[in-house]
Structure formats: structure tokens, C-alpha cells
Image (tube, rainbow, N blue to C red):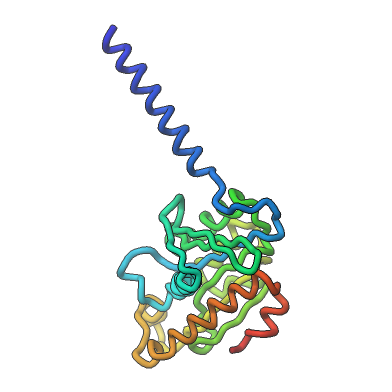
Amino acid sequence: MMSLLKNLFSRFRAVAERSRSESENSTKILDEDDTMKKFLIVGLGNIGPKYAETRHNIGFKIVDEIASMKEAAFETKKLGDIVAIKHKGKSVLLLKPSTYMNLSGKAIKYYMQQEGIAIDQILVITDDLNLPFGTLRMKGKGTDGGHNGLKDTQITLNTPKYPRLRFGISDDFSKGRQVNYVLGEWSDEERKSLPERLDTAAKMALTFTHAGLANTMNEYNGK
């Protein structure tokens, strides 16, 4: 009898804990009911110290810069590190997916659905080999350009039509060295320019939330 009661109690506790966990995970983060005022800014990258200073993690760097500007601190939640900020009357969720680059779309879709954020009000920030170092380019749609994070996002969202901000890392590598270059750390010369570039990229991303895609592109693209 005691064994049966212990078994039933264990099952009850497991169900209760699972229910509580699901409830916590489904709680909305943004305190905003107006869908026109809700935005999701996603920095793509790979988690872990060994990737922190690599070119491929520039997306993480830029959302870190935004959080720093707003004196906000990330928290580790389901599928990523997140923090909610306010900017000129807009509610913005910053996200650094913890899924690794190749599964970025999973985290993006999850927070879009949980927060009720429209696809034209997300901004995905990533590195781009096809642009000179530090060049910024925002677009409302496009191909993945061979970038695995964008590729997974396109597959998961079932469309290439979502805003993205590309940060140029250049293609200064010899044949067969692309992976080493992308996952390599910045050169000394790049490091000197990085703080100003991060500041401009962060301001560009925030401008998107209050000025819109077209105005932001006109003001910043190519800078």
C-alpha cells in the first residue's frame, strides 16, 4: 500500500512540476498589448566562451551593445538569453539564441509566437562575408547567402521575407580557410574599429523599431 501511495505521489509531483514549468515558459515577457509596438531583435551567434570573440558572433555583440545602452541585463530562458527593453514608446525583446547557429530559427519562431510579434517587426542580425569589414546593410528580404543561421531561419519561418541586418566581416582568407576565418577572432586592426562599429550597428537596429525599415535603410545602409 505504501509503495502504491509513493508511486502516485511521485507521479503527481512530476505532473505538477511539468505544468509549472510549461506555465513559466509560456508567460509573456513584453508588457505590451499593441502588436504595432512590439519588436524582436535577434543577434545570431554560438554560445560558449570559445566563440565569444569570433567574427561569427557579431550578432551577439550587437545585441549586447543594445542592452548595454539601455542598462539592461540578459537572463537565460527557454532557447536563449533574453531581455526586454523600451525604446521611444516601443517594447523590444532582445534575443541571443542558445540553439547554436544552425538552429537559430527555432528560437526566433518560439519568441515570435509567444509574444505575438509580426514577421515584419523582427530584425535578425548576422555577419556577412560579402561585405567589407564593418559595413552595415539592412534589407527586408533576401537569400541566406550561404549563412547557416539565415538558412535555418528561412526554413523555420517558411519565407525569406523578414528584415535582417548584415555586418560585414570581409572575405580576407585563402582558399579552403573560410570556416577558420569565420570562427576566428578579430585582427588587431579590426578590434580598434569595432567599438565605433558596434555603436553604429546598435543605433541602426534601434532606429528600425521607431523609424521603420525604409527610413533606417536610407539613413544607415553602407555606413
Picture layout, residue 151 above or below residue 54: above
Can residue 152 be seen in the rendering of this structure? no
Image quarter where the C terminus lies is bottom right
Q: Position of residue 181 (x, y in %)?
A: 38, 81
Residue 12 position by quadrant: top left
Question: How many marks overall?
Answer: 0
Q: Nearer the viewer, residue 67 or 5?
A: 67
Q: Residue at x 50, y 68 (%)?
A: 43
Picture layout, residue 38 above or below residue 131: above
Q: Position of residue 138 (x, y in %)?
A: 63, 78
Picture layout, residue 30 above or below residue 66: above
Q: Residue furthest left?
A: 2
Q: Residue at x 38, y 87 (%)?
A: 191
Q: Residue at x 59, y 78 (%)?
A: 204
Image quarter where the N terminus lies is top left
Q: Position of residue 157 (x, y in %)?
A: 62, 57
Q: Position of residue 84 (x, y in %)?
A: 53, 59
- For this view, does 82 lie left or right of residue 122? left
Picture layout, residue 56 above or below residue 173: above
Q: Residue furthest top?
A: 1
Q: Nearer the viewer, residue 30 or 39?
A: 30
Residue 184 position by quadrant: bottom left
Can residue 134 be seen in the rendering of this structure? yes
